[in-house]
Image (tube, grey):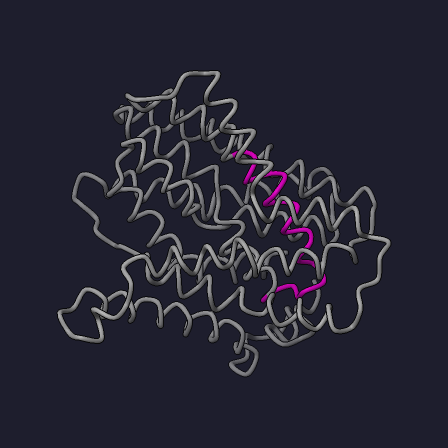
C-alpha cells in the first residue's frame, strides 16, 4: 500500500480516513453540485434560468474535448516512460470489455430481458466513463504524473471500443442501422478526427521536443480547466428517473459495473502477478461508472434512454463511494 497524490487525498492508506485529506474529493463534489444547481435553475421560469443555455453541458464538454484534454495530453504524455507497463492500460480495457459483455449477456438471457435493455447494458456496463470522469478521478487520487496511463486506457481502450464494439452493439440491437460500409467509414473518420486522439499522436511524435516555459505554463492553465468543466457538465446532465420496471436491470447493471468488474480486474492482476502504477490506474479505471457518450449512442439508437439516464446519473453519484473504496484495495 502507498500514499496517494502526494499525500493530499489520503495521507496514509493504512491509516484512518482523515477529513483534512478530503479536499480534492470535496472540490469535485462542489463542482458536481454547481452543475446540479445550474440544471435545476435552467428548468425554472426565472430570468436567471432562461439565461442558462439548455446545451450548457454540451458546450462544456466540447471545450474539454477540444481544449482541456488535449492540453493535458501535451503536458503529461511526453513524460511517460516507454516500457512494458504501457501495455497494461491498453490491453486491460479490452479484457474487461470481453468479461463484462459476457456477464451482461448471461444475466440478461437468464432474466429474459428484452433486446433494448440487453443492448443498453451491453454498452453501459463494459464502457466506463474513463475520460470525462476517469481522468479527473485519476488526477485526484494518483496525481498528474499517472494521468498518461488513464489517457492510454481511455484512448486505446474505451474510446476505440465505443467506436467499434459500440457500433456493433447498436447495429445489432437497434431497428435502424447504417449500411456496413458506411458504418466502417464513419468509425474510421471518428477515430482519426477525435481531438484528444490527434493530440495523443502529435504528443507522441513531439516527445523529444522540450516546450518553452511559456508554452508549458499555458498548457498547465488550460489543463486545469478539465476537472471543473467536466464535473459541472456531468452535474448538469444527471437525471435520476427510475421507473419501476427498470429497478432490477439498473441494480444489476450498476453492481456489475461499479463492484464486480473492478474486483475481477483486481483479482486477475494479482493472480497474474501484475503490480505497479500502470496496473493500479488500470484497475481503478475499470471501476468507473457508465460512459456518458455510450448513453448518448444508446439513446440515439432507441436502447431504453430512461434506463440509460438513470444508470449514468446514479452511477456517477455512487462512484463517489465505490472509487475511494476501490482505491483503498490497491
Q: Position of residue 39 (x, y in %)?
A: 27, 65
Q: How many marks?
A: 0
Q: Residue furthest left?
A: 45
Left/right placement of residue 55 relative to residue 157 reads left
237, 255: nearer the viewer: 237
Quarter holding the C terminus? bottom right
Identify which residue is drawn at 28% across, 68% down: 52
Q: Is residue 24 magenta?
A: no
Front residue of 187 and 231: 187
Was residue 151 drawn as part of the magenta stretch in this picture?
yes
Residue for point 59% across, 42% down? 265
**In the displayed structure image, the side of residue 60 where residue 238 appears, left or right:** left
Q: Which residues are magenta?
A: 140-161
Q: Nearer the viewer, residue 318 or 238?
A: 238
Q: Residue 321's x, y, as percent?
A: 44, 62
Name the residue at 34% across, 61% down.
56
Q: Is residue 214 left or right of residue 173?
A: right
Q: Position of residue 324 (x, y in %)?
A: 52, 62
Query: What is the quadrant of residue 218 in the picture?
Result: bottom right
Q: Is residue 243 above or below residue 109?
A: below
Q: Residue furthest top?
A: 180
Predominant SS along the magenta part: helix
Q: Quadrant of the N terminus?
A: bottom right
In this picture, is 21 found above or below 116?
Answer: below
User: Would residue 248 be found to the left or right of residue 326 on screen?
Assistant: left
Amino acid at each position: 500500500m502507498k500514499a496517494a497524490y502526494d499525500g493530499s487525498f489520503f495521507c496514509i492508506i493504512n491509516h484512518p480516513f482523515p477529513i483534512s485529506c478530503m479536499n480534492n474529493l470535496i472540490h469535485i463534489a462542489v463542482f458536481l453540485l454547481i452543475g446540479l444547481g445550474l440544471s435545476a435553475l435552467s428548468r425554472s421560469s426565472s430570468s436567471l434560468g432562461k439565461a442558462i443555455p439548455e446545451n450548457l453541458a454540451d458546450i462544456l464538454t466540447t471545450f474539454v474535448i477540444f481544449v482541456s484534454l488535449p492540453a493535458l495530453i501535451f503536458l503529461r504524455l511526453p513524460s511517460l516512460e516507454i516500457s512494458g507497463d504501457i501495455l497494461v492500460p491498453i490491453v486491460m480495457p479490452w479484457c474487461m470489455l470481453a468479461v463484462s459483455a459476457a456477464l451482461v449477456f448471461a444475466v440478461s438471457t437468464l432474466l429474459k430481458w428484452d433486446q433494448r435493455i440487453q443492448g443498453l447494458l451491453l454498452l453501459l456496463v463494459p464502457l466506463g466513463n474513463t475520460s470525462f470522469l476517469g481522468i479527473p478521478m485519476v488526477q485526484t487520487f494518483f496525481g498528474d504524473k499517472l494521468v498518461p496511463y488513464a489517457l492510454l486506457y481511455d484512448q486505446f481502450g474505451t474510446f476505440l471500443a465505443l467506436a467499434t464494439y459500440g457500433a456493433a452493439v447498436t447495429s445489432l440491437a437497434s431497428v435502424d442501422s447504417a449500411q456496413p460500409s458506411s458504418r466502417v467509414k464513419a468509425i474510421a473518420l471518428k477515430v482519426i478526427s477525435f481531438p484528444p486522439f490527434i493530440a495523443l499522436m502529435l504528443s507522441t511524435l513531439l516527445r523529444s521536443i522540450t516546450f518553452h516555459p511559456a508554452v508549458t505554463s499555458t498548457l498547465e492553465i488550460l489543463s486545469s480547466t478539465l476537472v471543473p468543466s467536466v464535473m459541472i457538465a456531468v452535474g448538469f446532465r444527471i437525471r435520476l428517473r427510475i421507473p419501476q420496471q427498470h429497478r432490477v436491470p439498473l441494480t444489476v447493471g450498476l453492481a456489475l459495473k461499479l463492484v464486480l468488474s473492478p474486483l475481477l480486474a483486481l483479482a486477475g492482476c494479482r493472480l497474474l502477478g501484475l503490480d505497479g502504477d500502470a496496473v493500479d490506474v488500470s484497475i481503478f479505471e475499470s471501476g468507473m461508472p457508465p460512459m456518458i457518450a455510450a448513453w448518448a449512442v444508446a439513446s440515439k439508437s432507441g436502447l431504453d434512454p430512461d434506463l440509460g439516464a438513470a444508470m449514468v446519473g446514479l452511477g456517477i453519484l455512487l462512484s463517489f463511494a465505490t472509487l475511494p473504496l476501490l482505491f483503498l484495495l490497491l
